[in-house]
Amino acid sequence: MIDNIKPYLEHVKGNTYCIVTRGCRIPVYKINETDAIMIDSGPPIDWEGILALLQEEKIKITSLLISHFHIDHIGNSVNMRNQFGTKIYTSLFAAAAFANPLNFMTIASGKLTYSAIKKTKCFYMPDEIIDWTADSVTVDGVTFGIIQLPGHCAEQMGFVTPDNVAYIADQLLSNKLLESISIPYCTCPEENLKSIDKLLETDYDKYILAHNEVVDDICELAEKNRNNIFEKAAFVEQLVEGEVTKAEMVAIFLKKTGRDLNSFRKVNGITNNIAAIIGYLIDEGRLIETAKDGNIYYSRNI
């Protein structure tokens, strides 16, 4: 991530720009000198900096396209609507997730308490649902291509601006993140791998990664991301000696990777990410799950 920077506007190509914050690149497509369409709204922690930049540049966000429902992508949607009257466009899944706190709690099962979810104050109803099967969407007279990229989460969408610039949200980790992150967030590794294959079939002029890079060619990076999934799955598989519980696997993982065993954020995050890989390994026939004495145990299918 880019630490302690003041958000600034970066030109990508044509009318396509990015707002660069400490950890995100947020695409902005200028319709004219004053009006623009934003893709994702960034995390709430960046709101004051994003707003100050937009006011400094005299840019009004007329519409907002949402790639997926994670808080660092949808966190300022309500702020945008309140500030500019921005119209919000999301998938049906993202709309359901942020319709109310209980919906989000159900979708993000176990990650946050109900009280913590309500404090986010990010809940809204979109102005329009984007058809998940559509290959384009027209907003304020501007047509954006759609790339369906499930796997990182459900119904993640990439958007292609009229400048042939593709915003692929969280589908690929940047080189810097691949080096620093212990295990990637991924709801479904199987679908994530398919989405990587889909990106490898594309040929856009530039690709914007939400965290936090712009690249001209994604072939090498896509292969690195694919290998990262395989390597992390193999690493988790190697944690299984005899019969172990998920909690035991998480503790072993944290020790082996030198992470803080007493950080709630680390333990909670790793637990969710390992759970997805466990499911992948079970589907691959590499792990077996059994119930015994009130616990679920995992063992290698040797």
Image (cartoon, rainbow, N blue to C red):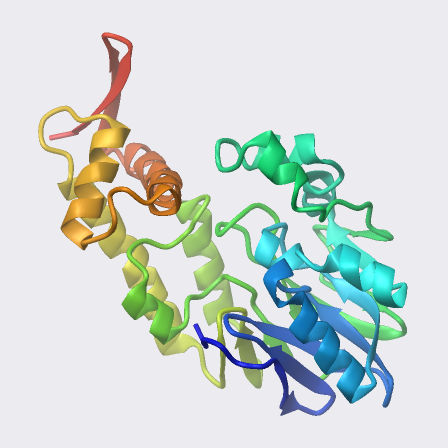
Can residue 161 be seen at all in this image of the molecule? no
Looking at the image, which residue is at 67% across and 56% down?
74
Of 160 and 257, which appears nearest the observer? 257
Residue 12 position within the rendered picture, expressed as x and y whole percent measured from the top left: 62, 88
Quadrant the C terminus occupies: top left
Above or below residue 226? Residue 263 is above
**Displayed quadrant of residue 147:** bottom right
**Count of numbered marks:** 0
- Identify which residue is drawn at 50% across, 63% down: 198
Q: Residue furthest top?
A: 293
In front of the other: 139 or 70: 70
61 to the left or right of 41: right
Q: Is residue 266 visible?
A: yes
Q: Position of residue 204 (x, y in %)?
A: 57, 80
* Percent of width and height locating residue 288: 23, 25
Q: Indicate whether 158 appears above or below 13.
A: above
Q: Look at 43% across and 49% down and name the residue there.
A: 186
Q: Position of residue 189 (x, y in %)?
A: 39, 48
Look at the image and tell me in which quarter the N terminus lies.
bottom left
Give the quarter of the image for residue 140: bottom right
The correct choice, above or below, for 59 with respect to 64 in the image is below
Nearest the eye: 85 or 234: 85
